[in-house]
Amino acid sequence: MRVLSGAGEFELVVQQITTDGDNVVLVGPMGVWDASTTITPEELMHLLRLSLNRKVLLHLARLPWLLRRRRRGGGRAARPGAG
């Protein structure tokens, strides 16, 4: 995953997903820093609500074909800001 911000562009590699109390924690390096991202139950529900729209659900349904095409070398390269 990429994080784009005014500070620059950073690669975020999620190496582990765990919990801490009621929270979900994503662990892995972001750029040159070790990072952990804590998501509260309210934030997780907000993300799920944002994801439950036609565009995202259709994209998820197409995912197996998109991955197969990329493995065969026919996929389009991701563009910054695309999605």
Image (spheres, grey):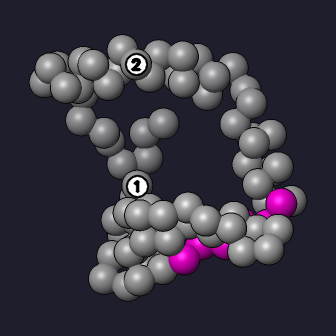
Q: Going by the image, does 59 lie left or right of 49? A: left
Given residues 65 and 24, the one toward you in this image is 24
Given residues 25 and 31, the one toward you in this image is 25
Q: Going by the image, does 72 lie left or right of 34? A: left
Q: Position of residue 48 (x, y in %)?
A: 75, 42
For label 1, the residue is 1
Q: Going by the image, does 8 lie left or right of 59? A: left
Place residue 41 in its image quadrant. Answer: bottom right
| Eye-nearest disc, 1 or 2 | 2
Q: Residue furthest bottom?
A: 33
The image's mark for residue 24 is none
Q: Residue at x 30, y 83 (%)?
A: 32
Q: Is residue 5 above or below residue 34?
A: above
Q: Amino acid at mark 1?
A: Met
Q: Position of residue 17 (x, y in %)?
A: 55, 61
Q: Is residue 68 visible?
A: yes
Q: Is residue 49 above or below residue 69?
A: below
Q: Residue at x 43, y 71 (%)?
A: 28
Predominant secondary structure, magenta span? strand
Q: Is residue 8 visible?
A: no
In the image, the segment drawn in magenta is 36-41
User: Per the image, is 78 magenta?
Assistant: no
Q: Secondary structure beneath disc 2?
A: helix
Place residue 26 in its image quadrant. Answer: bottom right
Q: Amino acid at mark 2?
A: Pro
Separation of residues labelled 1 and 2 (CA atoms)? 18 Å
For label 2, the residue is 64
